[in-house]
Image: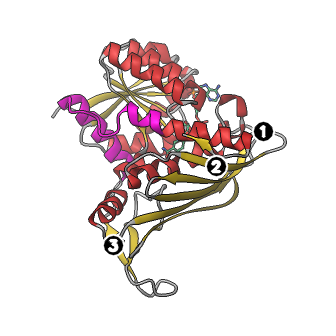
């Protein structure tokens, strides 16, 4: 299968440090170009990472016939507009999470996808990691009895006012940045949508971004709770609890590409970790798997495993969390 020629929209840190190197190692991904608002930046990153072409505007890269697909890691408020521009230029689009600011905005991508015939998908790399596939398989096999509760924690400490995460007007804040992961993984495990949510959201008094959120998602079969924060000690962990067992995902979201990952399966419930059995996964890069999966879809035309329709459902939960943060009540999803 011929690798897909990718263009990278911007010199974003996630691209430079994680996704571009991961795609350069992919079976089906060839990073052919990078574009920046600033040609010198594009050239510097291209030289450092060995990318053949550099452009000084996103539009120039979108006009390049060599480019088949683009990776969009722009600030959140530009996910939809630039993904639409790319689709209109005939490029497939893998767009960073959250794919939009609202469910309604996500629907506009569906309309463009269907009109242009390109593929557009949200880059939730965790769903490609074998540890999450295995966790879902164990749940489906009934290894923990009936799945009833998921508890997730995700935090980091980034007070930098210049960081896009601390700018409320361009889609900053903890729920968009990291709260989206407990939402997407809870939906992945339960396999259905929550019906209502409640959230306690604390905002930074200066930047007004949401800096500490605790939420409950009410699913037909059980409950998912999470806390996320942008101003706490960095930490991440997920507990998946059933009537007869428990699965712990130790490094659920930023699984390192340099060492094996482990989940712990406990069917006895001894105190501490006494009866928690590790399952280890060989070293893999979840961003490489993500790029290859998207590229394979382009080549084969197979239906997307996680289409935009799934992104709309995820954004509906996020919309409801923000509504609940304001109303201080349960909000229907
Ligand atoms: N999946 C993951 O693991 C993961 C991890 C981190 C971040 N992300 C997502 O990736 C995206 C980028 O995050 P990041 O931390 O890498 O961002 P970043 O380093 O701040 O990069 C964003 C880039 O967007 C371009 N840009 C265009 N308009 C801009 C504006 N008004 N303000 C700031 N930058 C602008 C800039 O590139 P040019 O100057 O070159 O045009 C900038 O370098 C976000 O959507 C985030 O949620 C995903």
Figure quadrant of residue 51: top left
Contact between labelled residues 1 and 2, with CB atoms less than 8 Å apart? no
Give the residue at mark 3.
279
246 is higher (above) or lower (below) than 113: below
Which numbered mark, 2 or 1, is in the foreground of this view?
2
Residue 310: in magenta span:
yes
Screen quadrant of the C terminus? top right
Q: Which mark is residue 208?
A: 1
Label 2, secondary structure: give it. Answer: strand
Q: Residues within 10 Å of mark 3 (few under 14, many from 20)?
A: few
Q: Write down the residue under mark 2.
A: 198
Q: Quadrant of residue 190?
A: bottom left
Q: CA distance from mark 1 to mark 3?
A: 41 Å
Q: Residue at x 52, y 36 (%)?
A: 315
Q: Nearer the viewer, residue 310 or 76?
A: 310
Q: Which residues are magenta?
A: 285-313
Judge: label 3 CB < 8 Å from ligand 1: no
Residue 33 position in % (x across, y down): 39, 26
Lateral position of residue 208 relative to residue 117, left or right: right
Residue 89, percent across and down? 38, 12
Q: Secondary structure at mark 3?
A: strand
Q: Looking at the image, is mark 2 or mark 1 earlier in the sequence?
A: 2
228 lies left or right of 110: right
For the image, the number of numbered tags is: 3
Q: Residue at x 48, y 52 (%)?
A: 219
């Amino acid at each position: 299968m011929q690798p897909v020629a990718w263009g990278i929209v911007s010199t974003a840190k996630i691209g430079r440090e994680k996704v571009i190197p991961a795609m350069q190692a992919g079976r089906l991904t060839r990073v052919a170009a990078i574009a920046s608002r600033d040609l010198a930046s594009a050239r510097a990153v291209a030289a450092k990472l060995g990318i053949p072409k550099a452009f000084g505007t996103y539009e120039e890269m979108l006009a390049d016939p060599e480019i088949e697909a683009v990776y969009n890691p722009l600030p959140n408020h530009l996910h939809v507009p630039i993904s639409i521009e790319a689709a209109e230029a005939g490029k497939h689009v893998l767009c960073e999470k959250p794919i939009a600011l609202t469910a309604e905005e996500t629907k506009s991508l569906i309309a463009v996808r269907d009109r242009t015939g390109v593929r557009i998908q949200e880059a939730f790399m965790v769903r490609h990691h074998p540890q999450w596939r295995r966790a879902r398989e164990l749940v489906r096999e009934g290894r923990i009895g009936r799945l009833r509760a998921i508890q997730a924690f995700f935090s980091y400490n980034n007070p930098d006012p210049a960081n896009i995460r601390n700018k409320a007007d361009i889609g900053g804040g903890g729920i968009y940045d990291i709260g989206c992961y407990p939402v997407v993984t809870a939906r992945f495990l339960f396999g259905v949508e929550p019906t209502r949510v409640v959230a306690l959201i604390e905002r930074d008094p200066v930047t007004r971004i949401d800096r500490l959120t605790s939420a409950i998602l009410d699913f037909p079969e059980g409950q998912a709770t999470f806390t996320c924060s942008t101003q706490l000690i960095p930490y991440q962990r997920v507990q998946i609890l059933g009537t007869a067992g428990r699965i712990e995902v130790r490094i659920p979201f930023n699984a390192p590409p340099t060492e094996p990952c482990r989940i712990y399966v406990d069917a006895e419930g001894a105190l501490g970790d006494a009866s928690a059995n590790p399952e280890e996964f060989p070293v893999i890069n979840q961003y490489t798997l993500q790029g290859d999966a998207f590229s394979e879809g382009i080549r084969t035309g197979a239906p997307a495993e996680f289409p935009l329709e799934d992104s709309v459902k995820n954004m509906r939960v996020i919309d409801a969390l923000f509504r609940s943060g304001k109303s201080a009540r349960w909000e229907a999803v």
